[in-house]
């Protein structure tokens, strides 16, 4: 993992994060998505901030586990479609730009620390790169999980790759090409969700998992996760899929789909 230089990473507390919140307590590094008014849509600088936080966790021996959370009713609505069209919202983040393009799927694969997601809101589209990238997902009941890209003239390229590592390829492809919403019970049966709980108990369930993990050998876990990444390496796939997504984004269907979504009408595919 080499998105930022070592000096920048060591001075993490000197930077202003505009899209995420960070906390480091008792060997657990918590990354909270903090763009609730925009349904935690993945703004380019938000992705950059996540990458910065992950590289810090990667090199910090005091971090033995990473917890992913979010503020607001929606955990993550996917990539920011306005930003994809060049309408990038100004921000006050002082986190430096990465040295190369950040591929979220690879970002999770290359962080050899146990990762758990505390899922308390709905998740859509590119948000599954976070869900599928975690080793354990604890979800509230009643959560909705959706892949609506095809209804916007898009296709969840990199999400497809990440999900195929967790659930069956047949289910992944069917979900991608039909674009439906999935209930949390089915997601649990498929293996995407590890545990279903409720708002009252979710903190304790997450804490129990974290306590078990941080009490185990950090070196053994690190080498184990690195070995798993090596034998199932998909770096070239994520690069290829990012290129394929670019092709889709430039298509007439993408322009029509995104316009129809904004105008709250049915798309007219040509």
Image: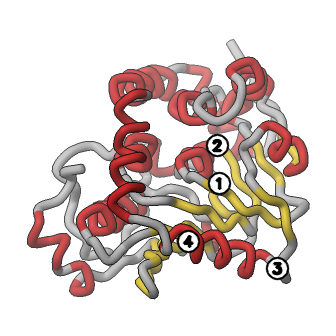
Residue lying at 61% horizontally and 27% vertically, measured from the top left: 155
Residue lying at 76% horizontally and 58% vertically, measured from the top left: 122
Q: Earlier in the sequence, mark 2 or mark 4?
A: 4
Q: Position of residue 120 (x, y in %)?
A: 74, 69
Image mark count: 4
Residue indicated by mark 2: 125
Q: What is the basis of the colouring in this image?
A: secondary structure
- Relative to 90, say whether 156 is above or below: above
Q: Secondary structure at mark 4?
A: loop
Q: Earlier in the sequence, mark 3 or mark 1?
A: 1
Q: Earlier in the sequence, mark 3 or mark 2?
A: 2
Q: Are marks 1 and 4 in contact (CB under 8 Å)?
A: no
Select label 3 or label 2 by which is in front: 3
Q: Earlier in the sequence, mark 1 or mark 2?
A: 1
Q: Earlier in the sequence, mark 1 or mark 4?
A: 4
Residue lying at 64% horizontally and 69% vertically, measured from the top left: 209
Q: Position of residue 9 (x, y in %)?
A: 19, 71
Residue indicated by mark 3: 201
């Amino acid at each position: 993992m080499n998105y930022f230089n070592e000096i920048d990473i060591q001075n993490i507390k000197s930077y202003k994060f505009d899209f995420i919140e960070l906390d480091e307590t008792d060997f657990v590094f918590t990354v909270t998505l903090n763009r609730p008014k925009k349904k935690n849509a993945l703004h380019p600088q938000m992705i950059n901030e996540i990458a910065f936080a992950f590289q810090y966790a990667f090199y910090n021996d005091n971090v033995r586990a990473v917890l992913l959370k979010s503020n607001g009713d929606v955990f993550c609505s996917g990539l920011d479609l306005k930003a994809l069209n060049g309408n990038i919202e100004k921000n006050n983040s002082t986190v430096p730009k990465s040295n190369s393009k950040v591929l979220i799927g690879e970002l999770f694969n290359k962080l050899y620390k146990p990762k758990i997601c505390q899922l308390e809101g709905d998740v859509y589209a590119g948000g599954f790169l976070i869900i599928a990238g975690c080793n354990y997902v604890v979800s509230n009941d009643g959560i909705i999980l959706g892949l609506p890209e095809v209804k916007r003239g898009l296709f969840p390229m990199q999400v497809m790759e990440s999900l195929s590592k967790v659930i069956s390829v047949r289910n992944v492809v069917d979900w991608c090409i039909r674009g439906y919403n999935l209930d949390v019970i089915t997601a649990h049966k498929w293996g995407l969700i590890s545990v279903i709980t409720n708002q009252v108990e979710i903190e304790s369930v997450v804490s129990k998992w974290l306590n078990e993990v941080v009490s185990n050998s950090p070196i053994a876990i690190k080498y184990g996760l690195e070995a798993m990444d090596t034998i199932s390496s998909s770096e070239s796939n994520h690069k290829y899929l990012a290129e394929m997504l670019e092709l889709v984004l430039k298509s007439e269907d993408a322009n029509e789909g995104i316009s129809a979504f904004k105008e709250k009408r049915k798309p007219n595919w040509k």
